[in-house]
Amino acid sequence: MARKKETAMLVLSRQRDEQIVIGDKVVLVMVLSIRGARVRLLIQASTSLGIMRAEKVSYEGERPIPQEGGNGSLVLSRKKGEKILIGDHFDLTVVEVRGDKVRIGIDAPTDVPVHRMEVYKAIHAEEQED
């Protein structure tokens, strides 16, 4: 039986067209629109991870079924409290929608970096200077 990695949830506030990077560009999440209580998210990830809406899970512990190779994109609408499962290790939750901002909770293994795109770019620009 495989041990589940220790995870932690990070909550980030994002507006339309702003992105979140999980891992070293393993998963990209972009806020496409915020309309009332509904948020449209674009998720780009390797098809080997698999992406699914949490309400499609039929029993505890079920995870998305990965597909073979390549990268894929998926657009999903979510409301407060709704989740998206990405592979075995990542969960996205819409924590709050307020005006033109959405707070997204990212539950990921503690050894996987999670950054706002602007922070990710700054880190990599600094590394290239060294």
Image (spheres, rainbow, N blue to C red):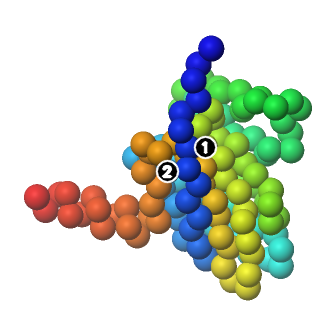
Q: State the residue position of label 1.
A: 90
Left or right of 55? Residue 1 is left
> What is the three-letter code of the residue carrying label 1?
Phe
What x and y, as percent, mark residue 67?
A: 65, 26
Q: How many marks?
A: 2
The residue located at (83%, 74%) in the rendering is 37
Dot 2, how many residues are within 10 Å of its Cα: few (below 14), some (14-19), or many (20+)?
Answer: many
Q: Disc 1 on helix, strand or loop?
A: strand
- Quadrant where the C terminus is found in the figure: bottom left
Res 104 → quadrant: bottom right
- In the depicted view, which residue is nearer to us: 117 or 71? 117
Direction from residue 84 to residue 116 in the image, left or right: left
Q: CA distance from mark 1 to mark 2?
A: 9 Å
Q: Which residue is mark 2?
A: 22
Q: Is residue 87 above or below residue 121?
A: above
Q: Quadrant of residue 82?
A: bottom right
Q: Quadrant of residue 87?
A: top right
Query: Can you see residue 30?
Result: no
Q: Amino acid at mark 2?
A: Ile
49 or 92, nearer to the observer: 92
Whether tag 1 and tag 2 are in contact, CB under 8 A, the answer is yes
Q: Position of residue 78 (x, y in %)?
A: 79, 60
For the point 72% across and 48% down, which residue is it?
84
Measuring 59% from the left and 54% from the top, which residue is drawn there?
9
User: Mark 2: which secondary structure?
Assistant: strand
